[in-house]
Amino acid sequence: MESTIVKSVDYNAYFGENHVVKNVNIEIPRNNVIAVMGPSGCGKTTFLRGINRMHELIPGATAKGKIMLNNEDVMEMHPIFVRLKIGMVFQRPNPFPNLSIYDNVIAGYKLNGIKLPKAEKDKIVEHSLTRVALWKEVKDSLTKKGSFLSGGQQQRLCIARAVAMEPEVLLFDEPTSALDPISTSTVEELFHELKKNYTLIIVTHNMQQAARVSDKTAFFYMGELVEYDDTKQMFTNPRDTRTQNYITGRFS
Amino acid sequence: MEAPIDTNLATRPDERSGRVVSIKKQDTVSNTKRINRSFRQIRAENVFRRTLIIVALSMIVLVLGIMLTLIWKSTLSIKSAGIGYLWGKVWDPVRDIYGAYPFILGTLLTSFLALIISIPFSFAVGVFLGEYYPKGWLSDLLKNTVELIAAVPSVIYGFWALAVLVPIVRNFETKIGVEPVGLGIFSSSLILAVMVIPYAASLGRSMIQMVPSNLKEAAYSLGATRWEVIRSVIFPYTKSGLFAGILLSLGRALGETMAVTMVIGNTSLIPKSIFAPGNTMASVIANEFTEADHPVYLSALIELGLVLFLVTVVINMIGKKMISRFTNE
Amino acid sequence: MTNHVKYRIGKSAAFKTLTIVLAFACVVPLIFILIYIIQAGITKINWHFLTNLPKPVGETGGGIANALVGSMIIISVASVIAIPFGILCGIYLSENRKSRLAYWSRLCVDILQGVPSIVIGIVAYFWLVKPLGTFSALSGSIALAIMMLPIIIRSTEETLKLLPDSLREAGFALGLPFHRVVLKVIVPCGISGILSGVMLSVARIAGETAPLLFTAFGNPYLSVNILKPMQSLPLLIFNYATSPYNDWHDLAWGASCILLIWVLTLNIFTKLMTRKWKVQL
């Protein structure tokens, strides 16, 4: 099995005239946690949303270049296929308010009209919730609405929802920025578990988080990929002065 | 912790697993199913997008269709009477003479009279709910009751006016010494005034509530009384919004048909006073449309409808523009 | 100085009193009308009244069964046409806020909202009654459906606009196609607002008379054929109220009472629901 799962080739993204992601070339190895960091407005979130074609949902947003998933260009695929293979978790927990916890986990099947036998649904729900370490907490209240949970639990529910679809890659857009410190550490612990089965790409503005959870780190600045290396290497011995300035806190 | 669960799930589509060789085939089957499904979804998605566009387009077609139908069906009358139709003083279907002036006058008289009567009341409701008592059960009750005024069907207003209001007006007319008909422009205006109160009132309320409190506080801090704040801060600030509310009431009054038809007295003569019977554009159409036995007659009635359509559209558009400009500021 | 201040305070109080008096005076005619109609009508309503046809002039008794059935049919058909159409259009407008088509479409909805109902009656006459060669319930339903559209479209659009974008994104990120995101995520989340708009629109047309004058036309007999003329409550009230016969007036009072109770119940019910669901309309 090839080790590279996602590879971008000369990827550019625009909002109207605004060139927000410039010529990004990056190779992401399978079953790794990749942190994408940089100051706000550096294009990191846009790049992340480009990987599963969420970028183009914004009116006026366009993109050029290639994003290869297992040597297939996602820009050539229909977004629906892309998003079935590449799941996403957002900055703010966004469980479906009209669905129960149970239905939220299998939302990807239910809302897509995929009929599964009850036993199989039960398995998916239990399995996904176990993977995000939420099963024990909610197994007795599966019929309650997802909005009853705390912020951290909601976010893990959203991760379970993405995991239930069995994607290959999971994208996280600042997944802990709306959470309290305890919930944050629970979610961070999850990343270690999840990378056994998935490839994780995490956008974060928090350098400590990047250092804690990731195997490799990419640093974006002004829409460019400045530096991409093993996390340890990046934080101990950055090659680019801009990276150095950033991680030593000279600008934020 | 992981392993036992995963074996349970061995039948699920899991491209990465590759752990149990025997289930690989099943994987491909359900994956193909999933992908075929998705192709169907993509087609459905395109159909849905197209349906939405067609629906949105058809709203435009509908409104254009209404306008073009009115224009097309009134060409006969437009050709025969020309622009003079609007100020022709005689409406006599028997002699085939069609002048809309009596009805235009009737419409303007009833509508403006109704507005003049209703404005103090709707403003009072607006100020009461927007400034004095924006909260509390009493204001809720008043607000909901005033909104219910708009919910009562106009045919019921007409019937009530016929049975109760018209005799009262007739008595009043006897007292002031005009011909006691009861039916007529004055009665129509009274019932219309009741009917249009909610329109200006609810808009007025929301506009007055939007006045920034720091403006009001500035005036209070200078020692202004409540009334002075209302007069010199709230009214100037909400001027255009209140005016838009009046326009919406006017648009409603101009097009109102049933209640007016029932109490205006239905005569094609030019009303000599506000107590005289008359006809509005809408009431003539309601009364004579099914009786119009020759083409020019029918066409002349439709031209009335066209005029009514254009006038109400213009008034409503100006009103809506003013509201959106106000709320955007 | 103090006198002047006193004068200003007095003036302010006087204005407040005037406002309160005028504001509550608005309610007086409504209460008069309600009491009068209910007094005049409630005594006429009984089982016989609801289940029988109107009698010809000179015979006492008779009921309004044909108008009740007719109103139900006309309103149902109008709803069947207007509700899906209106909701879809509302969805388009909220999903494509800035497109040129949305701008013009929205403008047309605004225009339609202000068109006098009698004008819609005229147009329905030329679109349906003339080509079909007869007055019909269907043409009346279409006229009423046109009147329902702006209310449904506006409430749908306004409701869906308020839903957070994160909901749509959650749906898209799961690989849902656009129509499923809309129909399975967005619409269910906004269903309360949409339903309120639908009910409001039904309440609005339940009492409409003018567009039915040249379309449904009225019919003294019981008819369930939507391609033939049909009686409806407001039409019956108008025709009998403007007739010179007391027996018919009695029928009209009874019918008015029923119509009034029906329409007000619908309105109050909608109000209670919007309050419970915290919907802004």
Image (cartoon, coloured by chain):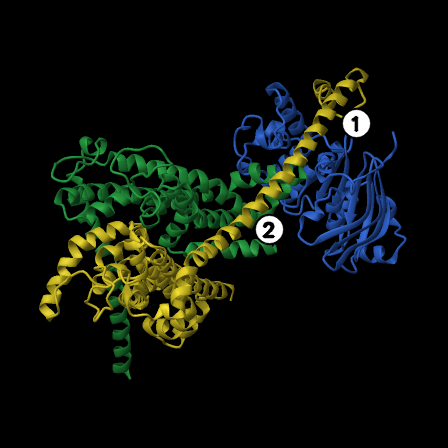
Element carrying mark 2? loop
Q: Is residue C227 above or below residue B129?
A: above
Q: Position of residue A152 (x, y in %)?
A: 62, 39
In this view of the protein, can residue B135 be seen by the observer? Answer: yes
Write down the residue under mark 1: B16
Task: Measure the alpha-carbon separation of dots 1 and 2.
Answer: 39 Å
Write down the residue under mark 2: C96
Q: Colour of chain B?
A: yellow
- Chain letter for the part of the structure drawn in blue: A
Under mark 2, the amino acid is Asn
Q: Position of residue A179 (x, y in %)?
A: 63, 44
Q: Which residue, as the protein is rendered here, is positioned at the far front?
A: B95
Q: Is residue B17 above or below residue B135?
A: above
Q: Mark 2 belongs to which subunit?
A: C
Do tag 1 and tag 2 residues touch (Cβ < 8 Å)? no
Q: Colour of chain C?
A: green
Q: Residue at x 71, y 34 (%)?
A: A84
Q: Position of residue C76 (x, y in %)?
A: 38, 37
In this view of the protein, can residue A209 be seen by the observer? Answer: no
Q: Quadrant of the C terminus of chain A?
A: bottom right
